[in-house]
């Protein structure tokens, strides 16, 4: 409870790094949209034009990027790929129900503070107080870590929709001004803006205020051509004809009204399965036996079997 | 650059007119995005503007239509002279077989130019997507395209070939969409961009009037049920949290103050008993209002984990329980309406709706379903076909239930016209106008018990 209490005792606000945030980063992260696609491709992330354009804009405008889309289309991978491309360290905040300030922002190291107090008998209260609320006793959590660093940083706030609404309020200050206020220390402002990626599965509607501060990117299922390239990249051993068929079948399944449409991750899994089985072409037996890899609900499997004219399942 | 700035603000204004909330900050960001991206690549520009102006996936279709008007691919018609219908069909079949998007777009432009024009006098002439598609009839090309793809051989899809028909249908659908966009663009050149952007662009599904929605829009609405339910669940949870704190339990506060000499040092808050409210839905599923009822039933079913018990009854002039038909897993949303009408007994001697009969039957057969914890929603237009509205049954219902709400998909100014008994019912229970999915979600968020 120490931070809460001290908020009232001591309200001075010292800016630790007084310089304003450098508006465009020293050297731009990317020079053009093509540059983004090319460099992401080197790390093994094939970006659609929409993804490349938005990543470029996020880096150029210095705004956080809110990525939504179904599970398994590569939202988290995108952040990792950007970090790798930029040679930046990746700071990840995994959200869950009940994640709070002390897990996301910072926490005081109580045990160490107590040790310090008992070690320094005979000091005046003022000395002790200023001492135990110094950086030495601060445990930075992901948000503060990302903001304090001098090196290039990619901050990934994963599954934002899982966090409670209160958490969004916390994110607002961090995302709009890239600063964090620690009542006992003052306001910590980023010397170097991190590249922020928030992901969401739309499990809960995020607040309008949070959306407003971000560039919005919806990653849907990829176009056939792009998906073929992804499969070829991830499962190089699969023949061209089979890759083509796999992508077409998955495309047809997505057009159906299923409870859980197969995602890119499932396509790749399926391709790997087919490779492991040594299947040369798709036929009814192979598809029937492996449908469980791409569809996760029994009624989906039945629907798909009817659609694909598989004999009795 | 000012011309571009005008385009951007025009685009933002058109989106706002369709209910997308865009602030000045977003418009400025959009302009910065345009400056960073340049105008050379249209698709990049589209993505850049979408990223800065939009906040959710639901607005994307609307955005794309408006974007095509404000940043058109070109101006005027295609340069080469329009060809006759047969040549166009030949080329279209080839393009569909090859799945060549660029060629399809060019053909759409030529088709609208050659076949879609109507009217001679300036001011009353224009281009019609409907007329273009009527004359070109791309859907009849299916067999031909299939033969062409199969004949082309090489492909050797084998197993995947059985999907070919669907794929071609999707390509044709895409072509129809292109023709629509092209016709809008040509008309906008004549009539002014802003006006067309406001009137001719399809609104987002949640702003379509239930009573006038077509099949396609209703299907789109059904797909929106799950996201909408999630949104509502968030709001209900927030309301529940707010409702759970704040009220002081005076008796227990005084009791605990005895330990501090009668000074109430620590207020004791009332503990909320976590009672899940019960919900009963009475839905008119006859002809015109069935789209509204189906949507609402699905929405309430999607919200079922928010309630202790949900029971759904459907009626036309007789009433039957359909809760079982809405079960999870079984609920194939597309066929829901048809299934309800097939499996439940909803009509007696005639097929038109009769509120008096149905409400009376409810009170008689299912009266026990309504108790002091139950909130009842009646969905329907209150058009009784001139039979007795059976007000005592409603009065009895209102007396027994915790709350009764009536959601009417008709505009308020038409209540009471013709055979509508809406004003009579509205005196007994709270009646709300509920014409669009947006209104419905607002009402549900506000009215549902927590």
Image (cartoon, helix red, strand yellow):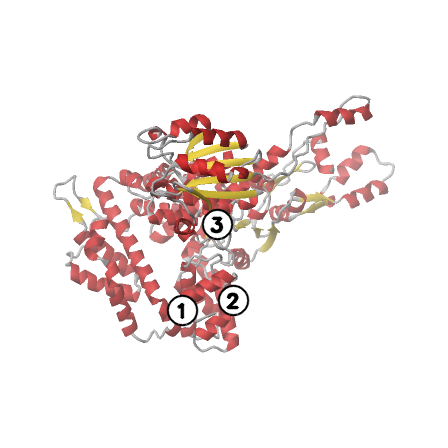
In this picture, residue B119 sits left or right of residue B325:
left
Mark 3 crowdedness (10 Å alpha carbons): few <14, some 14-19, many ≥20: many
Q: Is residue B143 left or right of residue A41?
A: left
> From the image, which quarter does the N terminus of chain B lie in?
top left
Q: Secondary structure at mark 1?
A: loop
Residue topped by disc 1: A309
Q: Mark number for residue B433? A: none
Q: Which residue is located at x 15 percent, y 56 percent?
A: B81
Q: CA distance from mark 3 to mark 2?
A: 26 Å
Residue A244 image point, x, y percent? 40, 70
Q: Nearer the viewer, residue A106 or B107?
A: B107
Q: Using the numbered discs, state the Cα–Cα distance from disc 3 to disc 1 in whole angstroms.
A: 28 Å
Disc 2 secondary structure class: helix
**Which circle marks residue B326 in the picture?**
3
Q: Position of residue A39 (x, y in %)?
A: 47, 61
Query: Which chain is disc 1 placed on?
Result: A
Q: Quadrant of the C terminus of chain B?
A: top right
Residue B284 position within the rendered picture, expressed as x and y whole percent measured from the top left: 40, 40
Q: Residue at x 35, y 33 (%)?
A: B387
Using the image, determine if residue A81 lies above or below residue B3. below
């Amino acid at each position: 409870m120490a931070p809460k209490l001290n908020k009232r005792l001591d309200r001075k606000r010292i800016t630790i790094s007084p310089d304003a945030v450098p508006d465009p980063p020293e050297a731009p992260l990317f020079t053009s949209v093509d540059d983004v696609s090319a460099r992401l491709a080197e790390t093994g992330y094939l970006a659609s034009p929409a993804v490349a354009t938005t990543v470029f804009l996020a880096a150029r405008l210095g705004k956080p990027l809110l990525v939504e889309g179904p599970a398994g289309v590569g939202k988290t991978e995108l952040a990792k790929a950007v970090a790798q491309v930029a040679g930046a360290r990746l700071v990840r905040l995994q959200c869950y129900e009940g994640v709070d300030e002390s897990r996301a922002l910072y926490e005081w190291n109580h045990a160490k503070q107590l040790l310090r107090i008992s070690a320094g008998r005979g000091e005046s209260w003022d000395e002790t107080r200023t001492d135990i609320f110094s950086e030495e006793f601060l445990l930075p959590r992901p948000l503060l870590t990302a903001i304090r660093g001098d090196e290039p940083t990619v901050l990934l706030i994963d599954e934002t929709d899982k966090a409670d609404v209160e958490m969004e309020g916390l994110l607002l200050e961090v995302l709009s001004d890239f600063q964090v206020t620690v009542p006992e220390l003052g306001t910590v402002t980023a010397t170097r803006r991190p590249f922020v990626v928030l992901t969401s599965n739309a499990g809960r509607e995020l607040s309008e205020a949070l959306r407003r501060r971000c560039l919005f990117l919806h990653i849907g299922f990829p176009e056939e051509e792009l998906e073929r390239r992804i499969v070829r990249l991830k499962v190089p051993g699969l023949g061209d004809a089979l890759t083509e068929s796999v992508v077409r079948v998955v495309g047809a399944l997505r057009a159906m009204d299923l409870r859980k449409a197969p995602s890119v991750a499932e396509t790749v899994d399926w391709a790997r399965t087919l490779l492991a089985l040594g299947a040369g072409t798709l036929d009814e037996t192979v598809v029937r036996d492996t449908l469980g890899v791409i569809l996760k609900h029994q009624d989906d499997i039945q629907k798909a079997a009817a659609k694909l004219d598989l004999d009795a399942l | 650059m000012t011309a571009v700035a005008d385009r951007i603000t025009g685009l933002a204004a058109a989106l706002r007119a369709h209910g997308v909330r865009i602030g000045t900050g977003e418009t400025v960001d959009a302009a910065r995005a345009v400056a960073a991206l340049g105008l050379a690549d249209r698709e990049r520009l589209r993505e850049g503007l979408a990223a800065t102006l939009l906040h959710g996936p639901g607005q994307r279709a609307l955005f794309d239509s408006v974007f095509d008007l404000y940043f058109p691919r070109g101006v005027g018609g295609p340069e080469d002279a329009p060809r006759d219908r047969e040549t166009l069909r030949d080329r279209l079949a080839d393009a569909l077989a090859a799945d060549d998007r660029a060629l399809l777009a060019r053909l759409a432009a030529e088709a609208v130019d050659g076949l879609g024009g109507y009217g001679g006098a300036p001011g009353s002439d224009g281009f019609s997507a409907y007329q273009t598609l009527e004359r070109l009839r791309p859907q009849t090309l299916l067999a031909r395209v299939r033969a062409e793809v199969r004949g082309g051989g090489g492909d050797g899809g084998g197993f995947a070939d059985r999907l070919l028909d669907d794929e071609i249908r999707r390509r044709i659908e895409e072509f129809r969409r292109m023709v629509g966009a092209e016709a809008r663009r040509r008309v906008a050149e004549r009539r002014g961009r802003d006006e067309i952007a406001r009137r001719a662009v399809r609104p987002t599904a949640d702003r379509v009037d239930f009573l006038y929605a077509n099949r396609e829009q209703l299907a789109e609405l059904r797909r929106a049920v799950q996201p909408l339910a999630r949104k509502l669940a968030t709001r209900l949870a927030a309301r529940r949290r707010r409702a759970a704190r704040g009220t002081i339990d005076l008796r227990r506060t005084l009791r605990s103050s005895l330990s501090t000499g009668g000074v109430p040092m620590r207020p004791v808050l009332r503990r909320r008993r976590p009672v899940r409210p019960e919900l009963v839905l009475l839905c008119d599923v006859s002809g015109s209002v069935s789209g509204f009822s189906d949507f609402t039933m699905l929405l309430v079913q999607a919200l079922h984990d928010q309630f202790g018990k949900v029971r759904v009854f459907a009626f036309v002039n007789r009433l039957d329980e359909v809760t079982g038909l809405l079960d999870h897993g079984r609920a194939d949303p597309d066929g829901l309406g048809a299934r309800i009408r097939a499996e439940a007994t909803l009509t007696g001697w005639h097929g038109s709706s009769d509120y008096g009969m149905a409400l009376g039957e409810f009170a008689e057969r299912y009266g026990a379903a309504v108790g002091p914890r139950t909130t009842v929603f009646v969905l329907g237009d209150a058009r009784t076909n001139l039979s007795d509205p059976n007000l005592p049954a409603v009065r009895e219902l209102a007396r027994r239930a915790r709350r009764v709400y009536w959601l009417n998909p008709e505009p308020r100014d038409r209540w009471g016209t013709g055979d509508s008994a809406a004003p009579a019912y509205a005196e007994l229970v709270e009646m709300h106008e509920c014409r669009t999915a947006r209104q419905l979600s607002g009402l549900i968020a506000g009215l549902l018990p927590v």
